[in-house]
Image: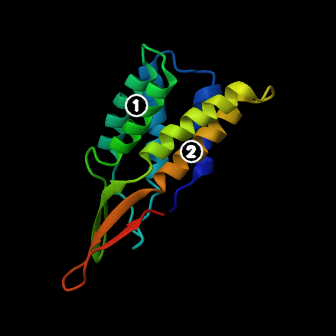
Amino acid sequence: MALAVSQLEADLRAIMAGPDFPQTGFDAGTRWARAYASYAAGAQSVSGDSPPSLAANESALGALLGAAFSNPSGDPSQTAGNIAAALTAFWFSPPVVFTGPPVSAIVTAVAGTAVLQAALLSLWASILAAPDPDDPAGQAAHLHAAALDVFTRTVVVSHFFPPPVPPVVAPIL
């Protein structure tokens, strides 16, 4: 299995254009967390291992995204920062472990937090400047999924092999 940005895009589009549009920021946060966790479940380490479960991470992400989407100030920069921080926390709360013989691996860094924050601000400006009149939800889902995919590929996993092989540190695939 691998990261499938097309599925993430489809899931986000369903949230944005579906008949059951989220009525609160927390409802939206829960749905976005479900979509992202489903996408992230396809992540593989360089040794081919995948995370066995992301349920706890999904729950924490839902709460953090819900808070970000419910941002009472409405400041886009603050909202983008909160979303980027929430997605970074997803990989550490608890730390995502990749399992499989003969190695174990754990997420040790997420390098794309600032990149995601900037990408969100840029794509929001793009959507406001030139909305797609035929499919605004599709446009938004495509741009958000692409930004989340770039961010996710900055997640770094450290692999621990049985001695005497030293650990290997590499991005997820």
Q: Earlier in the sequence, mark 2 or mark 1?
A: 1
Farthest right residue in view: 134
**Label at residue 114:** none
| Relative side of 62 to 166, left or right | right
**Label at residue 82:** 1
**Above-or-below relation of 157 to 4:** below
**Above-or-below relation of 112 to 84:** below
In x, y percent, where is residue 130?
76, 29
Residue beneath the point at 43% across and 53% down = 41
**Above-or-below relation of 170 to 57:** below
The answer to whether residue 99 is visible is no
Q: Secondary structure at mark 1?
A: helix
Image quarter of residue 93? top left
Q: CA distance from mark 2 to mark 1?
A: 15 Å
| Relative side of 164 to 90, left or right | left
Residue beneath the point at 68% across and 29% down = 127
Residue behind mark 2 = 147
Farthest left residue in view: 163
Farthest bottom residue in view: 164
Residue kind at label 1, given as amino acid type: Asn
In x, y percent, where is residue 44?
44, 63
Count of numbered circles in the view: 2
Q: Secondary structure at mark 2?
A: helix
**Above-or-below relation of 79 to 168:** above
